[in-house]
Amino acid sequence: MNLSHFKQKFQQILILAIVVSLVWLSLFTAPVYALGGKLPELNQPAPTFILPTNTGSKTISLANLKGKWVVVYFYPKDFTSGCTLEARRFQADLPKFLAINTQILGISADSVDSHAEFCESEGLKFPLLADEDGAVSKAYGSWVGFLSMRHTFIIDPEGILRERFTKVSPSIHSQQILTKLRELQESA
């Protein structure tokens, strides 16, 4: 067995061990845990953050978005099939989100440069934020070792976390979020 093959097998075993541990944690502990860690509590202030972005501003802060609904979606990696599909769906529905006072923010561990290339390639007109050390992903229970999980959170205009999604299907997720946002806004 050569060194390259050994490293590959070791990485696969390590990832499997992490996944099995997190699955166990999500199955046998309090319901606020999911694959990725402890989820923030609903109807409480959302974890705050300031992250670098690919847009004209250097950073985006959740605190600066008060007065708007915010959809924060975490995703594993730029240019992968599921992440590309999910981003395209959010982009296609962007006018509907803007019409209901909602800001879309995508977050992954990719760099600002990778996000810029991804946005240019896919024509994305909403910000992607670089969480390269995973600190924000961890605060949202959406971090597995080296990448963000596919989780989404809806935050109200006062900065309160109103909904979370941990089982996400990229092809229909944007529509699910729109439906839930309308329900939340009608009941507010």
Image (cartoon, grey):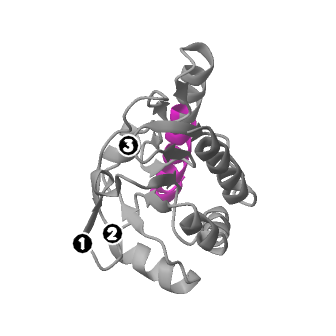
Predominant SS of the magenta segment: helix
Q: Quadrant of residue 170?
A: bottom right
Residue 6, percent from left and from top: 50, 50
Q: Dot 2: few (<14), some (14–19), or many (≥20) neighbours within 10 Å?
A: many
Which residue corresponds to mark 1? Answer: 58
Quarter of the image that includes the C terminus: top right
For residue 9: magenta? yes
- Amino acid type, mark 3: Gly
Disc 1, SS: loop
For residue 46: magenta? no
- Amino acid type, mark 1: Lys
Residue 164, percent from left and from top: 56, 38
Disc 2, SS: loop
**Are discs 2 and 3 less than 8 Å apart at CB?**
no
Between the C-alphas of marks 2 and 3, the distance is: 20 Å
- Amino acid type, mark 2: Thr
Residue 115, percent from left and from top: 42, 73
For residue 139, side relative to residue 9 (left or right): left
Q: Relative to 60, is 156 above or below?
A: above
Which residue corresponds to mark 3? Answer: 159
The magenta stretch is 1-18
Of badges 2 and 3, the one in the foreground is 3
For residue 175, side relative to residue 17 (left or right): right
**Are discs 2 and 1 less than 8 Å apart at CB?**
yes
Residue 91, percent from left and from top: 60, 73
Which residue corresponds to mark 2? Answer: 53
Identity of the residue drawn at 34% across and 39% down: 47
Between the C-alphas of marks 2 and 1, the distance is: 6 Å
Identity of the residue drawn at 49% across and 29% down: 42
